[in-house]
Image (tube, rainbow, N blue to C red):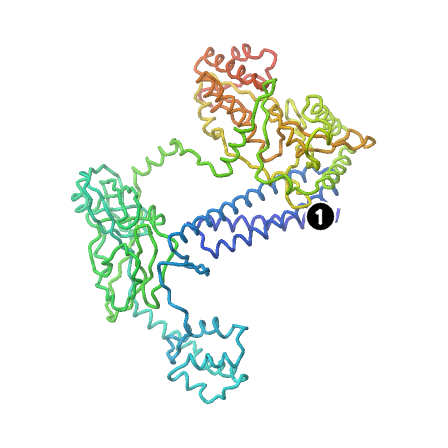
Amino acid sequence: MADIKSFIKKRASFKAKLTQFSSYLNIVQSCEKLSEVQLIEIEHRLSTFESLYEKYDILQTELEEAVDDPSEQYTEREEFEKQYYSLVATARHLIGMARKHLSRDAAFGVESGTSHTHKHTSVRLPKIDLPKFSGSYHDWLEFRDTFISIIHNNEGIDNINKLHYLRASLKGSASLIIDNLDFRSDNYDAAWKLLCSRYDNKRLLVNNHVQAIFSVQNITKESTLVGVTDAEGRPHTARVLLDNGSTANFVSEDFCRKLRIPTYFVASRVKGINNQSSDCSQGCTLSLNSLNEDFEVELDCHVIAKVSSSVPSTYIDTHNICLPSNIVLADPRFYTPSSIDILVGAEVFWGIIGMNRISLGKNMPTLLESKLGWLITGVVHQPNNFSNNSSSFMLTDDLRLGLNRFWELDSISSKHKLTYEERSCEQIFVETTYRDTDGRFVVNIPLKESPDVLGDSYSMAKRRFLALERRLAKDSYLKQLYANFMDEYIELGHMSEYSHCNTASTYPNYLPHHGVLKESKSTTKLRVVFDASARTTTGKSFNQIQMVGSPLQDDLLSILLRFRQHKIVVSADIEKMYRVTRVNDIHKPLQTILWRAEPTHPLKTFTLNTVTYGTASAPFLATRCLMQLAQECDDPSTRSTIEHDFYVDDYLSGGSSVTETLDKCRNVIAVLKTAKYNLRKWQSNSQAVLSAICKDQVSSDLVNLSDRT
């Protein structure tokens, strides 16, 4: 018992690491684009995380063997593996997307601000020179931190050279502090301590920073020029203010009249600083396009008398601002106070702003990359003490936008765009699937890697089977159910004894298996689950080399909403849906198991001949065969109900009358029978439908669905 508690305690640490990695991925997913440093970090984290499963597998296997009834442990394993593989897939997807963005940026000559790789860019960056320090407290912290980073902490530089670099970096009053020290190796530490003791004066540093703060003036927001088309299709140039603090978009009345675009009624109240509010009754739709790049966005704007005061509030002296010569500013006359025509809020703001930025120096603004050109933002040092600051933060209670969101709940989402792996999976199915003489589908398992990457799996499968056998020996009822299930598998031809001469494969891949008992089930109370996620000696599992495929059926919510609209409803499910579909002979050795009914019998190897529950590609293969039946169907109504009224193996449909419902069900039954699919467990709110379809197969009482349900 002590060992079991110890195992469970150790397993908790693995679950904690799972949660930590999930939290990290959530943070990464919130980023619009990943820098190269972030990409390297997530790759290293993923590498460390992937090694977690092997340790977990060893611990979990020991725990399963130690307990008398491992069914709960099997459930724990399934939940852990489900979350683990989901996180690994998410991380790999993020890595792939990050690499794509970085490759695209490299192609356009843009270098990430956090990247340390040497790429040819359109911006010529200055070389890093040794910092200079003349004794000003204003420059001390920058000099100290830079010198420590480049020279002081560099173990590749000896003390005599560090002293040489330190002397070369000091000038004025600062150089006098160490001027009397002899030029010897052992004097470097003394020189550095003298310098730090002189200038690490917290009181003077704080006073200096306070003075610097009061001498800085903010550029309040980023402004830009964009193109806008009027009601007659003529182009106009508008000055736009980008404000990520606003939850709505605004356009001035003067500019709206200039465009002569139609407006519509809105019931909106605009709230700002100090909860001041004003009513807005007009709105319009504008189409903005970049003057510098191929970018266009459509905005719903509130029409107000005046968007903002002039931006910037005062003229900015640009003589000390050194801009790179080959960048294109979104607003070339950013330094001149001008009126604002349009304010773009947070809804669009983050879709415009890019990842790259260029700092122009201390007390200088920063350049931000955007889809409208380079924006200039930040602070500038002004010689006068005049300050004219303005800020905005707007919230809207918009009746029209609220109605839009309401109707969007019923909108049809855009078609899922297939990934490369999903397209490959579909191609394999189309090129290799055929129907046998009985009409059953015969499929290839879609593999993304060669089966040669799988190592030995026999020892692990045997160890798991012996643990299962010990459990069954203690529960005669469970043992009988398990034996009955496996006997049925053999009798139906769903598995057969393995023979090397019947296949080209020499090394079969063994899948451990265990039982899941559900007494509430009316048909199969025990289902044997095959663990295709169990790792072989190479660290690879059968599931890891399979393609998952794309989702093919409608989401459950859509199916249920349509189901509730029918006057007469029916439900059924496909009997043994996975096992109706056969696996091609070349892939059967990848699905082998160990089995014997009694411990006294010899341990035999069997191949699973059908699509197997527990394998990664099984849901895709089963539902894709169903979709293939629909595609081959000549009747549009029957094709539509097969495509849209099935959720995996559950059939949920109906009609406006008994006759319509019966015709639909009979047509579906006939089409499915051509592929040996059998619909069973029929239920309906109409006794006439049940009696006509399956007099001998009614599995439960009528389902009473009233108008209030």
Residue 342 visible at all = yes
Query: Which residue does the numbered mark 1 point to in the structure image?
Result: 5
Q: Residue at x 51, y 51 (%)?
A: 24
Task: Characterize the local packing of mark 1: few (<14), some (14-19) or many (20 or more) Cα atoms within 10 angstroms.
Answer: few
* Position of residue 626 measured from the top left corner of the image (x, y, whole percent): 53, 24
Q: Establish if 366 lies above or below 7.
A: below
Q: Which residue is at a point 52% across and 85% down the rendered structure image?
A: 187
Residue 627 in the figure: left or right of residue 473:
left
**In the image, what residue type sits under mark 1?**
Lys
Residue 680 in view: no
Quarter of the image where one finds residue 622 = top right
Q: Is residue 102 left or right of residue 599?
A: left
Indicate the secondary structure of the residue bearing disc 1: helix
Residue 423, given in percent of the width and then of the height, sits at 49, 35
Tell me where residue 499 sits by quadrant. Answer: top right
Q: Residue 253: where, in percent of width, then height?
A: 18, 45
Vertical relation: 616 (above or below) 45:
above
Q: Residue 191, how many percent across, how many down?
A: 49, 83
Q: Who is closer to the viewer here, 69 or 79?
A: 79
Marker count (numbered): 1
Q: Is residue 502 left or right of residue 671?
A: right
Q: Nearer the viewer, residue 677 or 328?
A: 328
Outermost residue, right side: 600
499, 706: nearer the viewer: 499
